[in-house]
Each structure stands twice: as structure tokens, then as C-alpha cells.
Image: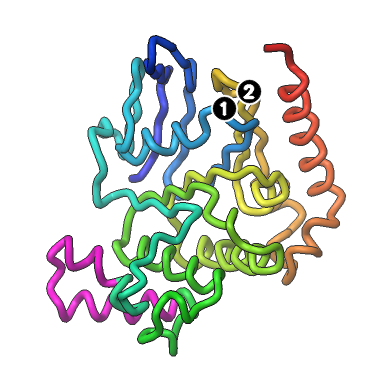
Amino acid sequence: MSEIEFNKVRRVYNASARVTVAVDDVSLTIADKEFVAIVGPSGCGKTTCLRMAAGFDFPSSGTVQVGNRAVRGPGPDRAVVFQHFALFPWMTVSANIMLGLRNAKVPRDEAEQRVVKVLELMNLQGSENAFPHQLSGGMQQRVAIARAYVLDPEVLLMDEPFGALDAQTRVVMQEELVRLARVNPRTVLFITHAVEEAVYLADRVVVMTRGPGKIKTIIPVKPIRESEAWDRKERIEDVMTEPSFVRLRTEIWRLLREEQKAPN
């Protein structure tokens, strides 16, 4: 099981005699194979939550657990995809994807088989020997996601992974991620500023307050998606015109606007 659990988490930073509370009393459970997106104003602690789940940062109080185990650092059960692709420019696509397997000392034959499978999963066949500068931004992000998937993690942590892409490429990658979630589901914590993206991708959308970040509300999306068969729509634009989608998007925007207007 790959459940993520935040239990009364508070994160405080002390720098230059200034105390900053990044997140305060955050409790959230993300079920096994559930896709949860977090949205909120800038500085509300979205990325701090993801970093604590990844083991890059730690709570000042409270606990973060993955798979009923306290997070004490990075681990092979979790993979992180960042906004910037962070590919090694001197390595080919295959070599970039292979790197994590080499570090994990996976036998070469098995590693090569896994790379072939993930290239197919991400529709990257034919690009194995290309270098990052020869790829579009969308293709580079596919490689970054493939590098995470090839490790076969139980949990995928995605920090605005499509934020650096142009609008058309972003739509393509959103559709690709939906496809991946169907054929190879993972527990996903997804950070985004884009409300439409959150509603389209997630089973639930967590809306946070302005800093110090607390959970303002949680919007369930999956029951509506299933009842209205959004997944039968071939194109994202068809989903975004559904009255239920518009209603959810409008509600989340209203909640975010409340936070933007809230007094300090």
C-alpha cells in the first residue's frame, strides 16, 4: 500500500531572526492509487508539503507517513518530477532514464528491459538515442516522467511538472498523464497553480489558505467524473465544457479569490 498521510503537520523556518510558518496543522490522507492535486496562493506551502512527502524536508511538529512508515528521507518507493526537466544534457534519452536504475544497482539486462517498456509507455520509441537539446519541451518532460516511472515507485510526487510548457504542449501532457493513470496507476500528489489542470487530473482537489498554509477545503472530483463519464471524452476541451467541470472550476476559483482578498 502507498497511502500518504499528513497528521497535524506544522513546518516553521527560522532565518535571520525571522520566523516563518510555512504550513500549519495540515492533516490529509491520500489513499493508495489516488490522485490528489493541491492548489493555493503563492507561498501557501504546497511545495513544502510535497518536499516533506519526498523526504527532502521534515515537519517541525506532526508526522508525515508513506505506506504507514514515517518519512525519514528520500526512498525508492517515491519518485519526484519537477517543473524543470533536470535532464543531463550530455546523456541520451535512454541514458537519462537508465541513470536511476544504475544507481539502484539493478542488473543491466533487467534495467534495459525496463527502459524499453517505459519508452513504450511514454510513447518515446524512436527517441532513445536523442539528446535533450534535440527534443521539444513536451518530449523532455516525457523523459523526466519516464525516469520516474522506470523506478516503479509506489508514489509519484509532481511539483508543477507542466508549468514550463506552452499551452498546447501542456494540454497534450495532461492527456498523457490521464492515460498513464489508467494503464499504470500510482499514488500521486500533484502541485499546480492551474485550477483547470487540477480539476481535469485529480480525484480530489485540496484548496489551501494563504500562508501560513492550512487546508481550506477538499473538493471531491472523482464521483462527478465517474457519474458523468468524463473519461469517455477524447479531448480535454470536451471535458472542460461540461457543466459539472465548469461548476467545480468556478467553485475553486471562488475559494482562491477569497484567500487573495483575505487580510494579512
Q: Residue at x 12, y 73 (%)?
A: 107
The picture places residue 83, in percent across and down from the top left corner, at: 50, 53
Q: Nearer the viewer, mark 2 or mark 1?
A: 1
Residue 44, numbered label:
1
* Disc 2 + disc 1, Cβ < 8 Å: yes
Q: Is residue 235 left or right of residue 1?
A: right
Disc 2/disc 1 C-alpha distance (Å): 6 Å
The reply to whether the magenta stretch includes residue 116 is: yes
Specify the quadrant that holds the C terminus: top right
Q: Which residues are magenta?
A: 98-121
Q: Which residue is mark 2?
A: 209
Percent x, y for residue 205?
62, 39
Q: What is the three-letter code of the residue carrying label 2? A: Thr
**Quadrant in the picture for the N terminus:** top left
Within 10 Å of disc 1 (Cα), the crowding (few <14, some 14-19, many 20+) is many
Kindly state the secondary structure of the residue where label 2 is placed: loop
Please state which of residues 70 and 44 is positioned toward the viewer in this rendering. 44
Residue 130 in the figure: left or right of residue 135: left
